[in-house]
Image (cartoon, coloured by chain):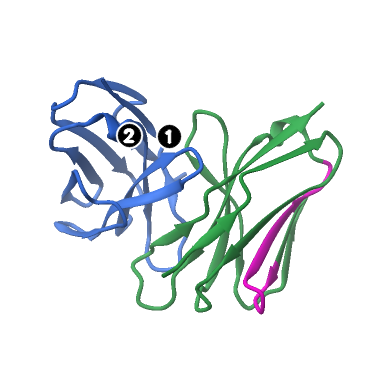
Amino acid sequence: GEDVEQSLFLSVREGDSSVINCTYTDSSSTYLYWYKQEPGAGLQLLTYIFSNMDMKQDQRLTVLLNKKDKHLSLRIADTQTGDSAIYFCAESLGSGNTGKLIFGQGTTLQVKP
Amino acid sequence: DVKVTQSSRYLVKRTGEKVFLECVQDMDHENMFWYRQDPGLGLRLIYFSYDVKMKEKGDIPEGYSVSREKKERFSLILESASTNQTSMYLCASNLGARSEQYFGPGTRLTVT
């Protein structure tokens, strides 16, 4: 079945770059998403990438997609303490689905001052 | 702005009680979802609904039921709460296939 895997924890120093990795299994995924969850809150969409793209950049965020290896990464440049949160990657299923997303376990990003 | 609201942020219930969690979205979205979130397990789909009165089981439906009588409202029901249902419950909605899901703030349920 479909599965999305992430490492559970990443710690970086303020000002460094953070790279959060994700692997997925459904080769027919059309969109891949990155969500951010701050403490005590719901999830907010950070960015997404369409499956026919290799890279997407949005200010401090860079998403890289390697379709051959089914690997997705999120790079946060100049990481700030306000970036401390849980980051989830998610894939949309192939055609015929009803808007379901499959989420990874979430990566907790700790930013040390 | 899309808004998804959940009836309670925190809830404490006793074992065996019937529990209702309510979710309302204001963007006329077709699809609505209920997840539970537990540390290290990510989000697991309990049930989803793709239309009024239509529902499908997700990955962990046991011990839960849902109701969608109106398009904007999706309720999660714990028929007889148990301690292993202590968790964070998140509601989400989206317009259709391959579109972003919008999340509510979550309800942290404790069953004692």
For disc 2, the neighbor class at 10 Å (few under 14, some 14 to 19, many from 20) is many
Specify the quadrant of the image occupied by residue B83. Answer: top left
Which amino acid is tagged 2? Gln
Residue placed under numbered mark 2 in the picture: B6
- Which x, y percent locates residue B11? 30, 22
Question: What is the quadrant of the N terminus of chain A in the image?
Answer: bottom left
Chain in blue colour? B
Q: Which chain is green?
A: A
Which is more toward the observer, A21 or A36? A21
Residue at figure coordinates x 63%, y 78% from the top left: A52
Q: Identify which residue is drawn at 17% across, 57% down.
A: B52
Task: Find the magenta span and give its range.
Answer: A65-78
* Quarter of the image with the C terminus of chain A in it: top right
Splitting the image into 4 quarters, where does residue B86 fall? top left
| Residue A85 to residue B102: above or below | above
Q: Which residue is mark 1?
A: B105
- Of callouts 2 and 1, which one flags the residue occurring earlier in the amino acid sequence? 2
Q: Nearer the viewer, residue B85 or B28?
A: B85
Q: Amino acid at mark 1?
A: Pro
Looking at the rendered structure, the secondary structure element under dot 1 is loop
Pointer 2 chain: B
Q: Residue A76 magenta-drawn?
A: yes
